[in-house]
Amino acid sequence: MNVYRPRVSAGIWLLGMLLLGALGLETLSRDWLETGFLALLPKIERRPEVAEAIERHSQLLNRKVIWLSGAASAEAAIANARQLERQVRGSGLFGNIMFEVAQDQTVNQYKRLFAYRYQLLDAATRKLLETNPKALLDQNLEMLYSPVGQMQAAMLERDPLLLFGRMISAQKPGNLSLEQGVVVLRDGRKVWALLLADLDNSQLPLEKLESLLQLSRNAAATLEKAGGELLVSGLPLFTAYGAESAKQEISTVGVGSSIGIILLFWFTFRSVRPLLLSATAIASGLVAALIVSVWVFGKIHIITLVFGASLIGVVDDYAQHYLCDSFGERDWNPRKGLAAIFPALFLGLISNLLSYAGLGFSPFPGLQEVALFSAAGLFAAWLTVVLLFPLLLTGFKFAHEPALLKLAVLWERDWPAWALKNRRWLAPLLLVVLAVGIWKLTPRDDVRLLQSAPPALLQSAEKISQLLQVRDSQFFLVSGKDRQEWHQNEQRLLEKLDALVQSKALKSYEALSRYWPDPATQQNNYRLVKHTLFDSGLAGRYMNDLGFDRAAIAAESKAFIEAEPNTLKLEDWLAMADEGKRSLWLGCAKEHCSGIVALSQVQDFAALASLQQLPGVVWVDHVEELSSLFARYRIRASLLLFSAFALVLAGLCFKFGWRGAATVMAIPLISSLTALALTGWFNQLFSLFNLFALLLVLGIGVDYAAFFFLAGERRTSTSLAVTLSGLTTLLSFGLLAVSSTEIVHAFGFTVAVGIITAMLTAPLIGSFTQAGSDQ
């Protein structure tokens, strides 16, 4: 340290910050903020066809927003929906809005399908023809003479057997109807008009997400004013609410910790210069963290900024230790002070960097971003203190004794004495509290805990799911070596699913082979109609009973004969299908064809998962896979935590010997166990994120313990530095504990408890030895 030159060091710091600023101008000029929930999740190694199926299945969910305008009558619901459509269209957020069904488009689609009416039989019609064809015709007669028969009578002349009408009806959900060109559904005394909207881009920037939220709120207020009700749901809305919550928490944590730090610094130092120096260390740390993270990852998630805001209280630790050291000696100067605390500063930096490096081993992109963001911020703040502060503190001396110093001295002196005096009952009590609390821990490995949503949005989503056949995240992937085998495999699966629908294991499903039979099935359907209705004479007698003349009956027979060679190709059917049905087909590649069977309102997951034993069937539950991954990595995180403790212990043994290392490591060990125990006692969420939080407790605990271990005659200034550091860190991580996102809350709670425990136990280092020598 004798060759240390403050001006040269400050110049190096300034050059580094200028280079960092130049990098920032280039890096931050592009879109760098990620808001999507899926970006937080790890990639799971899968077969390519399964990964493609998940991607295809998610595409619709990621962009679609469902709006239902409710009112007492269809007329009112449709009128309100038209006003809603104008608001949605005027927002400019959506590329595709589906509201009014074009009559000519529907007619053209029906005309193209009509030629294949004898080949496209729905399952119920085919079953009746196989078992009791006369019952099918009797049903037709009952339908024609019923109140709703007029709608079928309009098609009777062209489709006297009503085969086409039955097929179209079977493909439509029973509670949906078309009125004034708008899809409506009835739920008791209320009528709902449906509007579907697809976002232009599933990765909306933050300002567009804010616009989406405001649009939903304005629309709800408008419909409520008109006497109606709005239900709205969709993954983009959940993303928007998550982004809004994260933005509020960034403000809460950032502003709250900043105000707290300002007040604490003013109360302690009573000078503007320490406050400005501290602000410089914090600003350099946060700027470096942001630029380096975006430069490495390309984009960072908004949740990373939530944790980044909590970094304010941590990066300020080094500045506090340096500034507080000046209260320990009368002839203090910046160079002498830095020389005295540099070993502890360096050890604290290394322990913290090792802790955040542990986060980097997580498979979750969000935690990897937090690790780099925090490590870069800490290192930049540390360099600012070591390189810049000696120059800017030259000639500066505090002329007062802060009130906080008196409190810190009392805490550092009296608390250890009381603990030593009462150790005979404190130690057993602590062991009981730790043991029972850890025994009460119950892991919850649920990926959905990463996302928060207000109750109103969850209720709206649940209501929409009950009214409509909204797809669940679970689905089946069905494959075959060619289209015929794929179709056969899917048909076997659908037979099982029909039974599960009857037993209420799920509400409904969507499958391509339910709408489009393969060529072999189409020909079988044709032969079935020929054998049961035409060759038997049932069709002629049925038409005669309805009053058709001989010419009409002959015309129908001729049309049937001419339709024999007709086969509807899959490509032609897909060209006529809507986007939802098209997404069910994944295509054929390398002698491998596959499709998706989408599910709605699954109740018995085990029963559905058991169906993957069928040939060519794979059960895909992305949520459960990720939750299982959480569980596996919780175990790995436990091993990582043990390894981190062992690594730090080995390093401390090299520096202090095994007795000194054990003394220092006792602080983070007790702090970690206490954090776990209180998590159990207070029934807090326990997952792998708590274990990653304990890595930070390890770093902070070693930091505090090392300062007291190396304090020597500087215990007074050390107690002030640790007190100030602990309070500012608590301001940051304690505010994380008020987060509405359970995992962020649990992370903040664990770190906060760990810091408080480290603050309480760190002064015990050296106190027992001193007490023993005094006796």
Image: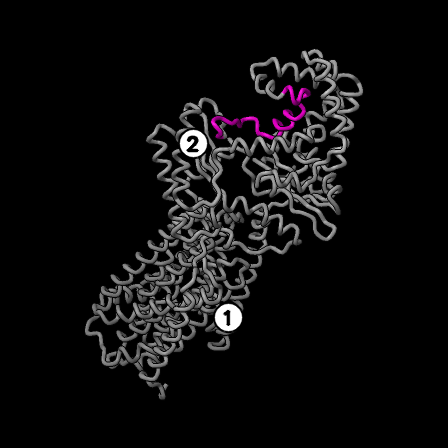
Q: Which residue is mark 2?
A: 69
The structure residue drawn at horizontal position 53% and vertical position 60%, both measured from the top left corner, is 362
Decide if residue 738 is on the left or right side of residue 122.
Answer: left
x then y, percent, for residue 400: 19, 71
Tell me, yes or no, if residue 275 can be seen here. yes
Query: Which part of the image, by quadrant, shows the N terminus?
Result: bottom left
Q: How many marks?
A: 2
- Along the horizontal axis of the image, is 461 left or right of 283? right
- What's the distance in space between the residues labelled 1 and 2, CA to CA? 63 Å
**At label 2, which amino acid type do we have?**
Ser
Q: For the residue carrying disc 2, how many other residues have a C-alpha within 10 Å: few (<14), some (14-19), or many (20+)?
A: many
Q: Residue at x 46, y 39 (%)?
A: 233
> Is 176 in the magenta?
yes
Quadrant of the snapshot with the C terminus: bottom left
State the image quarter where residue 730 is shown: bottom left
Query: Bounds of the magenta span?
Result: 156-182
In this picture, is 190 found above or below 687? above
Query: Which amino acid type is marked by label 1?
Result: Leu
User: Residue 435, relative to residue 197: is it above or below?
Assistant: below
Q: Identify which residue is drawn at 70% across, 13% down.
A: 549
Q: Nearer the viewer, residue 686 or 358?
A: 358
Judging by the rendered image, the residue that carries numbered circle 1 is: 649
Where 404 sits versus 471, above or below?
A: below
Q: Dot 1, how many residues are within 10 Å of its Cα: few (below 14), some (14-19), or many (20+)?
A: many
Q: Residue at x 62, y 21 (%)?
A: 155
Q: Secondary structure at mark 1?
A: helix
Residues at circles 1 and 2 in contact by the CB criterion of under 8 Å: no
Q: Position of residue 266 (x, y in %)?
A: 23, 65
Front residue of this view, candidates 604 and 663 = 604
Q: Earlier in the sequence, mark 1 or mark 2?
A: 2
